Image (cartoon, rainbow, N blue to C red):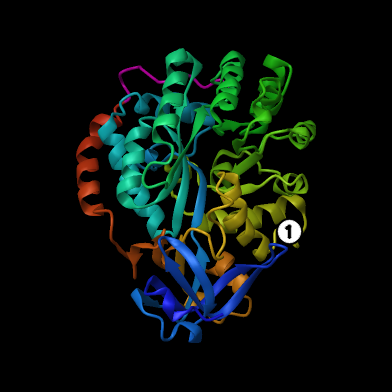
Amino acid sequence: MTVPAASGPADLVVTGCTALVHDEAERVGFAEDAAVVVRDGVIADITTADAVTGLAAVERIDARGQALLPGLINCHTHSPMVALRGIAEDLPVAEWFNDHIWPIESHLGEREVELGARLACAEMIRGGVTTFADHYFAMDTVADVVAETGLRANLGQAYFSSQGPGARAASLDFALRRQGSADGRVTTCLAPHAPYTVDEADLAATAELVHAHGLPVHLHAAESRAQTEHSLARHGVTPIGVLHRTGLLDTDVLIAHGTGIVDSDLDLIGAATGRVAVATAPRGYLKFAWGSTPVRALAGLGVPVGLATDGAASNNSLDVWEAMALTALVQKSTTGDPRWLTSRQALHHATLQSARAVGLGDRIGSLAAGRRADLVLVDLRGPHTQPVHDLAATLVHSARSADVLTTIVEGRVLMRDRELLTVDVPAVVAELAERLPALVERRHGARIQTYDG
């Protein structure tokens, strides 16, 4: 298809790339020597490089030797926690929380949250992530950082029952105030922390708020099999059973992790009347010895499983490329089937499935006319990506986040040829280093919560 010259100059034209596309059955394929035309932050056309030769454009990118993908989506993270990267290693989860993370987090102020979020946004932009779902504290600050750095995010102000009903009210207030901010790039949700830190009365009240205000929910649940066994002993039902009992499975809910989902949970999820999605972050599960998210069983129910990194305090990075490769490999290992997940299936999870998981499946996740122009260009010319016999396999198992050359959100270039354009990383790192000694002090005896899940 040729773009009519009468339509005027495009805002951005990317030419000469190999574009990842979905067919009508949502199977992943590739279009050679492709071009993308962007107007007003939206993909106006996917066509051929020859078709746009004479098209005027404010900005052009020659992407020969590069793959064009929809921007990657990090479906569950805690962006400010990059400040705690590597602070608590090789520990069981209870010790990790109680002796390290939750005592340190009692020191967090808005400035530390801002610096952590800025550093996280820089890392994600450099790794080709254009959208992230964040679940943390001081989220007005994170929303401001998202607005300034140019990324897209779904944000939820986390709360525990131990904080009292005011924390739930604050989560709702944030969600209502910041919905659609940053020129529509920020969407919001309610964010109870987890069934082991939020009691059933609070979870039921959250479900009522969701129905009253039309908001989704983002929370941790069934993070491990040990949590599931603990919940059965304490409540008589699994964590997923708690979500069912409190009405949260009848809402649009994004469940982080789910490695503790058991067969009986699948029946509840399959019968749910809400849009249930799951975010899987395999690197952290390998570190905590948690097992794996039952991606295949969830896919059989039509549940979108999005890729995630969790926070860098547990995962050490915000690298969704790594999450994509590990998801494919771990699923092969746990199912005993080398045909699952294939590279193309992994790319589908990284794109359209992840978009659906964060409630944005109608806006992002594929390269198609009318979708928001969230794009990444990946260099295929390195020795580790050559030769290319199967581009899907190359992208999933050979390419690295460092191969992302250019990251674009709504047609705005946030990184070009590896140069960040919206974050001053040295300034952020310098100030964060000054604040770290006070932040990581743990002798005060305080903690924001106690883990006994």
Residue 244 seen in render: yes
- Majority SS type along the magenta span: loop
Range of the magenta residues?
A: 442-453
Residue 449 seen in render: no
Image: 236 above or below 439: above
The residue lying at 46 percent from left, 47 percent from top is 132
Q: Which residue is mark 1?
A: 340
The residue lying at 43 percent from left, 86 percent from top is 53
Q: Amino acid at mark 1?
A: Trp
In-image side of 338 versus 136 (left or right): right
Relative depth, front residue between 41 and 145: 41
Q: Quadrant of residue 21?
A: bottom right
Q: Quadrant of residue 332?
A: bottom right
In percent of width and height, residue 350 lies at 58, 56
In percent of width and height, residue 333 lies at 71, 54
In-image side of 389 versus 58 (left or right): right
